[in-house]
Image (cartoon, coloured by chain):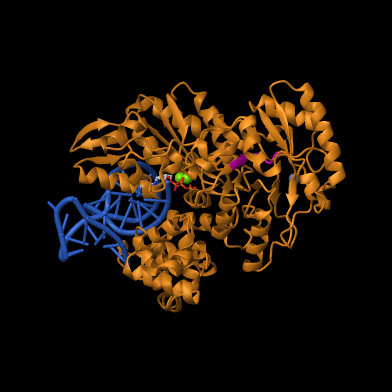
Amino acid sequence: MSNATIAEILQNIANLLELQNADHFRIVSYQRAAQTIRGYGKELVEIYQTDPAQLLSIPGIGKSLAEKITEIINTGTCQYYQELLGKTEPGLLEIMQLRDVGPKKTKLFYHELGIKNIDQLKQAIQSGKLSELPRMGEKSANKILTAIEDRATFKERILLDEALTIAENLIDYLKQHKACKQVSYAGSLRRRKETIGDIDLLATSDTAKNKTALAEHFLNYPATQRVLARGETKISVLLSNGRQVDLRILQTKSFGAALHYFTGSKEHNIRIRERARKMGLKVNEYGVYQGERWLAGRREEEVFAKVGLPYIEPEMREDQGEIELAEQQKLPKLIQLKDLKGDLQLHSNYTDGNATIADMATAAKAYGLEYMALTDHTKSLYVAGGLMEKQLETQYKKIDALNKQLKGFRILKSAEVDIKKDGSLDIADKTLAKMDSVLVSLHSSFTLDKDKQTKRVIKALENPYTCIFAHPTGRIINQRRPVEFDLEEIIKAAVANHVALEINGQPARLDLHDRHIRLAKSLGAKFVISSDSHSPSSFGYLFFGVAMARRGWLEKQDVLNTMSVDKLLAYFGRKTK
DNA sequence: GCCGTTTTCGGCCCGACTGTTTTCAGTCG
Ligand SMILES: Nc1nc2c(ncn2[C@H]2C[C@H](O)[C@@H](COP(=O)(O)OP(=O)(O)OP(=O)(O)O)O2)c(=O)[nH]1
Ligand SMILES: [Mg+2]
Ligand SMILES: [Mg+2]
Ligand SMILES: [Zn+2]
């Protein structure tokens, strides 16, 4: 029973409760617990098996939720959930997901017109029945019809790199207008979540007239398909690719407060606002107030300062303990992209890369790196033209020659060594001993049972040559589920055997990801951040790897490829020499 | 349903936009 599944059940309970006449705050309790569990590093099953009472130490989980979670762990579901499911028309949940339709309207349609599913809702709109309901009219009904049409397309969340490109293009466009004083993206994109729901933008302008002008400019953006809402300070549009963009336009004196508000997360915002309230202050997107009096809001730092906290980096703002650390002045100094000195996973045209070793080295150097490890695939991965021992050794001679020519840059001998089904490596020790770094990963037998898979990986990590375990869970966002194994046991084996865990920067991988990184760090693990480049233009993926590392609260010293090449070679040399 | 350095009961973040409303509920951020 994964945390994701437990969270899903609690979220479903919250949704079902909305359709009952449940107390709002009770619903919120289920939602908050679901949110916390979704981002929790440790598996709740693990906590429960060690000491069930520990469940109560998780914020937002009390006696009642702990009992339900226990039941879910033991039986896969819980009585309460089943009862709620039993007394709810299943189609109502789908109706409630529609844009501009919430629990109140869903219930109204059901009770007044007996509407049980989207098809019936559509019919009621087309026959004009829906607009006759209290507080409903033509416009509301038509909006719902549009929401039904939009529903099928574009519901998936997008990857971080795609969202970043959309946002940067929009920002370039907004900046072209002279009424635009400041502009930034916010929301989950600024927090660098691995997937992004919508694009949140914030701009400032000085006068009312300029705000209007800037709003007009935004609406003229060529990729805008449809305006969802337009008010004095906030505009929501749908781009032609179906992605929603929310833009807020405020005064420059509110930029910091608005950026803080719009960056979120929602849970973090609520904590900050509760804190302000206890201090006799009020925080909103316009600033920090004492009564009617505006105290601050130009910069984010001021908002934090007014509530007695140091600046908290956006990547940490998830209410997963960052506020407590901030209170104690114990916030980590997060790693930055410029701290990286090398890249320890990338491919050349010896296997499935598209460039020569020399071209990859030139590109890596141009990106600002001092070294790179060439990690072409090994023989088991014949689809990628994986290399045999002999071919690897030939490649290493080539690397020796290249290294003689290169100034201020070093190519390390490595490989992405395949872990076979039995946990052994597919390259002979004699060749492993010639490598500067041995990176291992799974490419097959993803569906072994959990126990076998765990043992298989641990065996590979115990191999004395193994230095790095790459893209550990093997997940590909929106495409492939993570391998089933006991990650906590694997992390412990990695720590015991001095094997670093990779944070793969490919936007569809980001593996390990935020919550696993925090868990691994708490268990004493070391990390490497890799681009896994298959072309010279892909070193930018390091940015996304660093983003994940920051969401995992990592500092420079947690990441091995922040070391100079000599230190790194000495570190791995304990294994390979 | 959760939580507590003034509380074990009584609070629980705060605001924008829309449509249908004559004063605000519903939904969303
Ligand atoms: N104070 C407060 N802020 C909120 C609330 N809902 C949203 N926000 C703020 C914080 C969010 O990060 C920000 C943008 O809202 P979004 O719905 O776009 O969420 P976010 O970007 O975090 O995630 P997403 O990837 O878009 O699903 O607005 C709320 O209920 N209260
Ligand atoms: Mg968003
Ligand atoms: Mg948004
Ligand atoms: Zn490859």
Compared across the picture, whether A162 is left or right of B4 comes to right
Say which quarter of the image contains residue A259.
top left
Coordinates of residue A297 in the picture (x, y in percent)? 31, 31
Coordinates of residue A566 in the picture (x, y in percent)? 64, 30
Q: In this view, does A248 lie above or below A404?
A: below
Coordinates of residue A160 in the picture (x, y in percent)? 57, 43
What residue range appears in magenta? A528-533
Is residue A235 within the magenta segment?
no
Question: Residue at position x 79%, y 43% from top?
Answer: A352
Question: Residue at position x 47%, y 67% from top?
Answer: A9
Compared across the picture, whether A101 is left or right of A60 comes to right
Say which quarter of the image contains residue B14.
top left
Coordinates of residue A121 in the picture (x, y in percent)? 50, 66
Question: Residue at position x 36%, y 67% from top?
Answer: A53
Q: Say how many tags the image has.
A: 0
> Which chain shows up in blue?
B
Identify which residue, A401 or A505, lies in the foreground: A401
Compared across the picture, whether A475 is left or right of A556 comes to right
Res A101 seen here: no
Q: In this view, does A183 lie above or below A178?
A: below
Q: Is residue A16 above or below residue A513?
A: below
Q: In this view, does A536 lie above or below A283?
A: above
Identify which residue, A396 or A22, lies in the foreground: A396
Identify which residue, A149 or A165, lies in the foreground: A165
Res A533 seen here: yes
> Which chain shows up in orange?
A
Q: Quadrant of the C terminus of chain A?
A: top right
Identify which residue, A245 or A568, lies in the foreground: A568
